[in-house]
Amino acid sequence: MAGQAAFVREFLRERAMILINGRLRGDPLALLHLDEGRIDPYPLYERIRAAGPLTLTRLGVFTTADHAVCDQVLRDRRFGVGGRVVDDTAELSFLEMNPPDHTRLRRFAAPTFGPRAIAGFDGTITAVVRRLLDRLPTGRPFDLVADFAAPMPIAVITELLGIPDADAEEFSRYGTVFGSALGGLQSLRHVGQLMEAKQQLARIFTRLFDLKRAEPGDDVISRLVAAEGDKVRPEEMVPLCTLLLIAGFETTVNLIGNTTLALLKHPEAWHRVAADPDLAAAAIEETLRYDAPVQRTGRGAMEDVEIAGRIVRKGEYVVTLLGGANRDPKVFDRPARFDLDRPNANDHLGFSSGIHYCVGAPLAKLEARIAIQEITQRFGNLAMIKPGVRRPGSLIRGLSSFPVVGYPILARA
Ligand code: HEM
């Protein structure tokens, strides 16, 4: 109870700081947390970039939209996770740990999501994608996010973890609430929902551990219960599963949504991908740069560090604007342009950098590639019928509703 009260107090203090410094003082980092940043963060990144490679903001934290500085902070072992001032959400296992605990848990999880393990997953993903596409109407409106991009990664990660069909709906419900907090908590009601979802997820995961101990299968949770002990401590089991579940829920949906949106806004690119499905991989890589689903992260200095000509003192925090770094003109030629032929698109920081580089990157790219290939093949002609609705929060960037209508035949000019 005391923990919950402190959580609520901290949440209210952060919201007040953001409102005062954003609305009254025009601080661009504070504005990023408000509607301005949610709708279009890119002009704010340019303001931050223009102020220098590393600047101290009115929120009391440093920030950077410089590609080299972001990369340096994320790779420098003198910086660590923890001590976040804003965007605090919930325990997310090794994403929020430093070595040696980070190394131990990441070593356990990484092989499951490595390129080799994931390659065998092609068929399952294609089957899930086709099943969802088969339910979509032709020539009548549907919601690309709710009816396709959201359920797809949920179905895939549920299968990978070994969650039985009977429990999938419950996991999906609580996982979605929990995942929505990744983008930053929106209200006190949201805080309450998160606490409830956290308890419910712990309850159903614990029941699932018992089930897998009795009847192990060829899945991540069975491997986890077998590794319980020195490799994974009992109290680490629920947060680890929650991280894997949520990371799969709330990010890939936006990669699929943002790629589709960028392609629809650039019809010649859409038609190129529809004509040559091999180009889907380039569209996804360019979207990870041009409109990344995870827009920022951050690190705290564990000792005094000199960086970009400034001293970041021990305990101070740097917000690394991944979405801003991805538009750094020192690295990307004409960065505001969506370009399928960009030679260095994959220098983006959309999956972060350093020791926390996204474990699920190969899975996310595979899911998104198959989704984009199948949708462009199914609907050679897809059109947005009214403006989509942006998700709440600006850390995770994407649409929560994306109304479209699709026809199988390519449009003729
Ligand atoms: C488009 C989809 C995705 C994007 C944009 C994305 C992005 C990211 C980013 C930016 C980080 C690092 C955060 C930081 O440095 O503080 C991260 C970490 C992580 N991601 Fe992803 N992710 C995606 C999909 C996935 C999927 C499908 C999984 C698999 C379950 C996953 C699992 C993880 C895990 C476990 C970490 C923590 C890694 C660590 O701390 O060592 N992600 N992701």
Image (cartoon, rainbow, N blue to C red):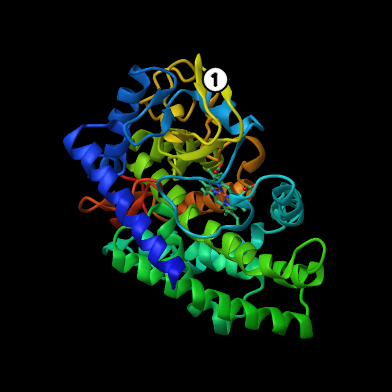
Image location (x, y in percent) of residue 200: 50, 78
* Residue placed most toward the observer, 47 or 229: 229
- Give the labeled residue for mark 1: 307
Does residue 171 show up?
no
- Using the image, determine if residue 394 lies above or below residue 158: above
Q: Dividing the picture into quarters, in which one does residue 37 lie?
A: top left
Q: Residue at x 62, y 41 (%)?
A: 357
Query: Is the C terminus in the top left, top right, bottom left or bottom right quadrant?
Result: top left
In the picture provided, is 119 more to the left or to the right than 146?
A: right
Number of numbered markers: 1
Quarter of the N terminus within the rendering: bottom left
For the residue pair 317 and 279, the one nearer the viewer reads as 317
**Which element is circle 1 on?**
strand
Q: Nearer the viewer, residue 324 or 99?
A: 99
Q: Is residue 320 above or below residue 233?
A: above
Position of 302 with respect to 42 (left or right) is right
Q: Amino acid at mark 1?
A: Ile
Furthest residue toward front:
2
On the question of residue 146 being in view, the answer is yes
Q: Position of residue 120 (x, y in %)?
A: 72, 57
The crowding category of the residue bearing disc 1, from other C-alpha atoms within 10 Å (few below 14, some 14 to 19, many at least 20), is few
Please provide percent x and percent y for residue 359: 64, 48
Q: Say left or right for 237 vs 128.
A: right
Q: Does mark 1 have its CB less than 8 Å from ligand 1?
A: no
At 34% across and 25% down in the image, what residue appears? 48
The image position of residue 327, as x and y in percent, is 41, 26
Q: Is residue 411 above or below residue 343?
A: below
